[in-house]
Image (cartoon, helix red, strand yellow):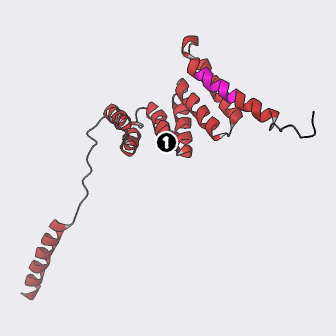
């Protein structure tokens, strides 16, 4: 009899505690990659960069161009390493997109690092576009080449006071 009462009590406790154990529900994302992408663009335009990053990351699983936009946001925020990483992914996934090459070249230019690589990237961007669309890309390339020329010529020394 005690055994039966013990079993009943045990089953009752298992029932009540079993009902209260939390469980994880996994829901399918109701938004498509394109909807995440559009939402990210809206957040970016509104200056809500954290939300835009979250949405671009969700979109990037299916839309490679999202990496380009992630690079732009990180560039804007001054997070240059993240910008560089995302531009490189964008170039790898969409090698025909001149904007990724150009923006990575510009990133290197403003940091005054990897200027030879920046020149190569900017040249590739120019090659990828039609002549009539090349002006902004040529501008980047020209600025990088000017910086390289300055770097090659070395620092300019002021004339000495004893010089004529």
Res 6 quadrant in image = bottom left
Q: Residue at x 67, y 24 (%)?
A: 142
**Residue depicted at 68% across the width and 33% down the height:** 117
Characterize the magenta stretch by its predominant secondary structure.
Answer: helix
Answer whether residue 90 is magenta in the image.
no
Residue that extends furthest to the left in the rendered view of this protein:
1
**Residue 129 position in % (x across, y down):** 56, 17
How far from the left and from the top, in percent, is residue 47? 38, 39
The quadrant in which the N terminus is found is bottom left
Q: What x and y, as percent, mark residue 59?
A: 38, 36
Residue located beneath label 1 in the image: 74
Describe residue 101's horizontal placement relative to residue 164 as left or right. left
Query: Whole-percent x and y of residue 164?
Result: 93, 33
Q: How many marks?
A: 1
Residue located at (55% from left, 24% from top): 98
What's the residue at 89%, 40% (across, down)?
Answer: 160
Magenta-span inclusion, residue 144: yes
Mark 1 Cα within 10 Å, few/some/many (few <14, many 20+)?
A: some
Residue 120: quarter of image = top right
Q: Is residue 23 left or right of residue 16?
A: right
Task: Give the residue at the far bottom of this rendering.
Answer: 2
- Magenta span: 137-145
Q: Nearer the viewer, residue 149 or 41?
A: 149
Quarter holding residue 138 = top right
Is residue 9 rendered to the left or right of residue 29? left
Label 1 sits on a secondary structure element that is: helix
In the picture, measured across the screen, residue 116 lies left or right of residue 51, that is right
């Amino acid at each position: 009899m005690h055994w039966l009462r013990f079993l009943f009590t045990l089953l009752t406790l298992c029932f009540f505690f079993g009902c209260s154990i939390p469980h994880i529900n996994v829901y399918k994302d109701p938004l498509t990659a394109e909807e995440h992408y559009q939402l990210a663009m809206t957040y970016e335009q509104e200056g809500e960069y954290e939300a835009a990053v979250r949405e671009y990351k969700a979109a990037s699983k299916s839309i490679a161009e999202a990496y380009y936009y992630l690079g732009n946001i990180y560039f804007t925020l001054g997070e240059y390493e993240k910008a560089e990483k995302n531009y490189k992914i964008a170039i790898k996934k969409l090698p025909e997109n001149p904007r990724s090459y150009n923006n990575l070249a510009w990133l290197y230019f403003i940091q005054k690092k990897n200027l030879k690589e920046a020149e190569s990237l900017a040249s590739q961007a120019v090659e990828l576009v039609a002549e009539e669309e090349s002006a902004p890309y040529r501008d980047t390339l020209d600025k990088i080449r000017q910086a390289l020329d300055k770097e090659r010529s070395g620092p300019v020394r002021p004339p000495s006071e004893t010089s004529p």
